[in-house]
Image: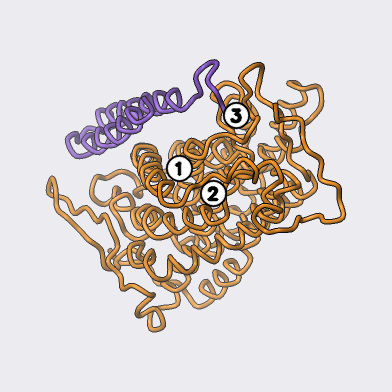
Amino acid sequence: MKYAGLLVMPAGFFLSLAAIVLFADPSQRAVFVVCGLAVEALGLVVAVRGNMPARGESRP
Amino acid sequence: MNTPILSDSLIALTLVLLLLAPLAIAGVALINSGLGRSRSAAQALLGNVAIIAVTAIVFAIVGSAFAGCLPGGPGHIFHAAGKPWNWLGAGPFLLGGVSSAPAQSQLALLFEFLAVALAAMLPWGSGADRLRLIAGCAIAAVLAAFVFPLSAHWIWGGGWLSQLGINFSLGAGFLDTGGAASVHVLGGLSALAVIWIAGPRRGKFPKEGFSTAMPGHNAAYVLFGCLICLVGWTAWNLAGAILWLHAPIAALPLTAINTLLSASTALAATFVVTRIRFGKPDASLCANGWMAGLVASSASAALVSPAASLFIGLVAGIATPLLVELFELALAVDDPSGAVSVHAVAGLWGLLAAGLFAPQTGQFVAQMVGVAALLGLFLPLPYLLFWLLNRIVPFRVEADGERVGMDLHELGGGAYPEFVIHRDDSYR
């Protein structure tokens, strides 16, 4: 899970990058950049969840 | 792109400011040490000094070539969608040609030397009490050689992020005059990667019950570090405003005032939040709030009005203690220095706020693209590099090292040899 989350995060970055290349309209750009950030946030949440010790797991 | 030439008086002023800026590094080193345990204090401070040395050497040999000093310098450029994408510096290794470079370029280089040292100290603070000295140095070397130069070139060296204004009409391009992105967000996200790879301190999150409180050993160090940081940060923000924004002397006092206002409102907000939350203000969280205000000001102090600085500091100060609690209690992130909340999150907020309050049209979208680049690449990339590095140089000390303390284990002597070092109650 943690690796999946970290792999999703660059996808959000490329979505933001695509937004500024593909759209000339400022509002469309802004919306798609926000979508890219949302994808990154999703990846971050998955990565954080993946790195949290499971309940009852043996810890150092 | 032609870079405006600074006058001799501005060059002299920038040099003086950059001689004061290391006080920010000293302050962060004191804070890192004070927030750790007494039996690891000497190792923590030695680690900070060693990291400054390692980053200076590695950045001089390799990193400076990839970073580039000023817009217009050599860079690796590819063309896509009809636009140039300058993604990596192509300067000489081993600081070749620096002696004949203009003073402005040399000052920019000095700024980057200080920036990479501070960025590399943040993961060290977060890995306190369990990170081996050699691992801290190796992490610093990786950051100085590959990761920091990439972000520094994109933002300060004429890279694609700084050219968003020219190529895509997004304000003045991504702006980060004080290092909120290249230093604090990068360092804070690297700290998160190190925390995940090294794991929490022994006994921090026991199987049963809540996380164990492991308070810092010296609140006086921490708070004095905050005071030193104010001087260093102000100098840092002013030097950045001159170098990267080409601000005139007349604009500098306002930048200094904004830095102070942001830190002050952040401290006041944290003071009130912790007073409400715990019944009494918490010294280390108030220090974190102060630092978060300074970090947020790194992005915004040269760009926004005093009223906006008050608001930026207020949000940073309210959010920081809540985030520290969230990371520790809910997300099991063992971050003794609070680098993730204080540097990464406050830095991201400062960058977005700079776009929100900056006068240029399209600046907010430029800042969002920059934030997307930081979050999307500069957490996965350090994580991957550190994961590989951990296979070669194990980050974490053996269990016995944690038990006796990093000072005795790694240095053979403690920071306070005349004190009785108590075994804490966290070992169950």
Q: Quadrant of the C terminus of chain B?
A: top right
**Is B304 placed above or below B210 here?**
below
**The N terminus of chain B is located in which quarter?**
bottom left
User: Are the numbered discs 3 and 2 placed on the same chain, yes or no?
Assistant: yes
Which chain letter matches label 3? B
Q: Which residue is mark 2?
A: B298
Q: CA distance from mark 3 to mark 2?
A: 17 Å
* Co-location on one chain, circles 2 and 1: yes
Q: Are marks 1 and 3 on the same chain?
A: yes
Where does the image place residue B188, in percent across and percent down from the top left?
51, 43
Residue at 55% over, 31% down: B333
Amino acid type for the residue under numbered disc 2: Ser
**Chain A tint as drawn:** purple
Q: Colour of chain B?
A: orange
- Residue B321, given in percent of the width and then of the height, sits at 65, 30
- Crowdedness of circle 1 by 10 Å Cα count: few (<14), some, many (20+)? many
Left or right placement of residue B412 versus residue B159 in this view? right
Task: Look at discs 2 and 1 and give the one toward the viewer.
Answer: 2
Q: Earlier in the sequence, mark 1 or mark 3?
A: 3
Q: Badge 2 local density, few (<14 within 10 Å), some, or many (20+)?
A: many
Who comes first in sequence, dot 3 or dot 2?
Answer: 2
Q: Find disc 1 in the rendering and name its residue.
A: B358
**Residue B346 lies in quadrant:** top right
Q: Secondary structure at mark 3?
A: helix
Find residue B262 and report its image quarter: top right
Circle 1 marks a residue in which chain?
Answer: B
Which residue is pictured at 60% across the width and 71% down the height?
Answer: B16
Front residue of this view, candidates B134 and B163: B134
Contact check, label 1 and label 3, Cβ < 8 Å: no
